[in-house]
Amino acid sequence: MELPKTYNPREFEERIYKDWVEKGYFKPRIDKNKKPFTIVMPPPNITGQLHLGHALDNTMQDILIRWKRMQGIPTLWVPGTDHASIATEVKIVEMLKEEGLTKEQIGREEFLRRAWQWKEKYGSRIVEQLKRLGTSCDWSRERFTMDEQCSKAVKRFFVRLYNKGLIYRGDRIINWCPDCKTALSDAEVEHKEEEGHLWYIRYPFKDGSGYVMIATTRPETMIGDTAVAVNPKDERYKDAVGKTLVLPIVGREIPVIADDYVDMEFGTGAVKVTPAHDPNDFECGIRHNLPQVQVIGEDGRMTEEAGKYRGLDRYEARAKVVEELKEQGFLEKIEKITHSVGHCYRCDTVIEPLISKQWFVKMKPLVEPALKVVADGKVKIVPDRFTKVYNNWLENIKDWCISRQLWWGHRIPAWYCDSCGEITVAEEEPDRCQYCGGTDIHQDEDVLDTWFSSGLWPFSTLGWPDDTDDLRYFYPTSVLVTGYDIIFFWVARMIFSGLEAMGDIPFEYVLIHGLIRDAEGRKMSKSLGNGIDPIEVIDRYGADTLRFTLATNNSPGNDIRFSWERVEASRNFANKLWNATRFALLNMEIDRVIDIPYDVLDLSDKWILSRLNNLIKEVNANLERFELGLAASKLYDFIWSEFCDWYIEASKARLYGGNVEEKRACEIVLRYVLDNTLRLLHPFMPFITEELWQQLPHEGDSIMIAPWPEYSETMEYKEEEESFNILMDVVRCIRNIRAEEDVPPAKRIKAIIHPATDKVLKTIESGLDYIKKLGNVQEVDIVMEQPEDKRMRSMVLTDMEIYIPLSDLIDIDKEIEKLNNEKKKIESEIERSTNMLSNEGFVKKAPPQVVENERQKLVKYRETLNKLVERIKTLTEW
């Protein structure tokens, strides 16, 4: 069948994907005699759409999945989406605002109805975009973090941890977003370096004996101070400990206490202690039994406890506090500093540490086994340098705040009794209090942190807490592919959740990839306007081009630079493969798979078969090490250079010749190499490889379920490889000389070769036809001595010298005439420039840069003249 002349992915990508889905190629069959390969997709948010990060992450997963599937391994890729509590709620609130409504006005039930409508309308958008990318997920197993099964898992896990004493409710400092009006975990706070100030304030002793100087970045919180702390080892303050201070502008008496947490090197070595507004101060306050005075509320405004500042925005209060400190003489000085400020990861509002009654997970009992499985190598992080990041975060983790003051999400399965005040925690809604039997109970209003449900993803998607066939066979999963920016959010939580719920690791490998940056190395963002829509790339160039662009130059853990030049290069590669296959089909008379006739193979056949065999080994080795970028580069080099530029060119003489046996052997090898090359490339570029493979004589219904090529020692032709490489070196030299002398492509020339060894001599003698054909050479002379005629262009290689008569390359008389004309022009320029620089008026009056430019021109003119004179001399002597 003749392929269309032009590669146009729009003509077949959608058709092919639909065919794959309809035929069920993405669905694995459970075979208990084989170990499965499983990946769970990091679930994209239902509020989002496909971005380059998603495209990279899912391309990498699909490469691994398609590779393992072709190896005959039962392969499952579980897709799904995340409800994204905060992000989705923000969208619904924005929609309500356009109608002039608030969520409180419509009530929880109506709000949730609208949220589910949103999910149905927009949640499938990113799924359809992922399908356009070619992701071969088992869509029949698609999950949603709030579907019935996942919700059941969340309740079971919550109750399990609660009954073990690992979940508790209490008053602690949490990260609060005044805009989203919800608590955040530490991992959901983004710290940014910002310019700020350090205010130095005098706190006077009650007895009038002086003052303690403190430095703070947040003077508005001093209204809630209940102590000043110093390090017990700090000699400067040993006499101050135990004395009483008077809080400036407030008048409250507070003690000076000693605590090891104080950094003697920061500021003045004395710190204000505000237990209600700082996590370290909170812990210090617990140790010293200090009062907790909350002066900033959940709306970011000052509370009643703030006295005359109540009702002010926190930053307005800051300005007034500083002004009053100045007026009363308590402000010593102000320093400009750069410091880290926490922001809400969703709305970018500066977070406020507040004391709040929330639900927490005790992390220490869960962290220890999670650290051990990585230390023991049961879970391997690739690249290994991110193991340190993982360990550092877990070793310093605090109890996890899991409650969120939202309506969209998994509602906390806890009910409060209005009669006895006890809490009933259960998977199903109780009809009465389990302690007093009272029926006047109500459920907690809060929902769980989104990451609580996402942490269960590797096993909740497979049916947990039910004992399903999928769970028994496909868990633990094989690889988690994710970016380094969510190691904290997700990876660690899945590991400790899997160990707790399943008693086993959730995956064997964590493959970490970097971020995609623009061509200048900048992070892509709306503010910079440098973001790229993957669907735009697919619309213009096809999914295969985008996938190959993302796969090349991809190494574990490292960022990738995206450029349209790289996209164009990938498109050109696809076009090259298309045209090579089209050429093969136009010159192929065989209509079925035929065994390779090893007894009639020529040198180029054995060379390409050996190179293909080596390629199979290298691609496999790179994929095993998760070096997807190296595997893609190997495929690119083989297809573009060795197969298209060398083997196909070498095959034309036999394909167009009259020897039927040679032609048939060449066709068989051509089909075999194309077939195996397309299979190797399929995980990276699934659509074009399927379309081309279907046109070749083949066995089986689809390339995606065709056997993966295997390395074979019988396909090693090392001597033939070495011989053909010698011939390629000869041809390259001849081509380089032709290019340097600008010889027209149609002009046939003579080549003289002086081999240095018998092996090279025999190789050249047997390969004369290749040299003539591929080098466009009319005649080849093999000489055992260096030619006496010096009118030659030559190139020296390790085991040979190659000469080409100059008369074959150029018309010497015309070349000398042309060079003499160029020489006269340069001499004229040298004379003009020399006269200008000898003119004192020019040198003194002209701008210095103009004079310097002229001097540089003169130097270049003289260099050019010397080269022309040398060239003319050489040609004249010849």
Image (tube, rainbow, N blue to C red):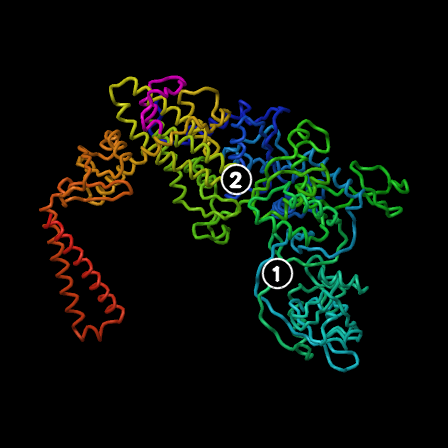
Residue 153, given in percent of the width and then of the height, sits at 72, 36
The residue positioned farthest toward the right in the image shown: 436
Count the labels in the image: 2
Between tags 1 and 2, which lies in front?
2
Say if 366 sits above or below 263 in the image: above
Q: Is residue 596 magenta?
A: yes
The residue that appears at 16% across and 72% down in the rendered structure is: 838
Say if 693 sits above or below 250 in the image: above
Q: Give me the C-alpha separation between circle 1 and circle 2.
A: 37 Å
Q: Circle 2 is placed at which residue position?
A: 626
The residue that appears at 26% across and 30% down in the rendered structure is: 767
SS state under label 1? strand
SS state under label 2? loop
Q: Residues within 10 Å of mark 2 (few under 14, many from 20)?
A: many
* Residue numbers of the magenta segment: 583-606
Q: Camera-side residue: 690 or 826? A: 826
**Left or right for 700, reference 441:** left
Q: Quadrant of the N terminus?
A: top left
> Quarter-wise, where is residue 78 in the image?
top right
Residue type of the residue flagged with mark 2: Phe
Q: Is residue 228 visible?
A: no
Q: On residue 7, which mark appears? A: none
Q: Circle 1 is placed at which residue position?
A: 341
Residue 411, given in percent of the width and then of the height, sits at 73, 42
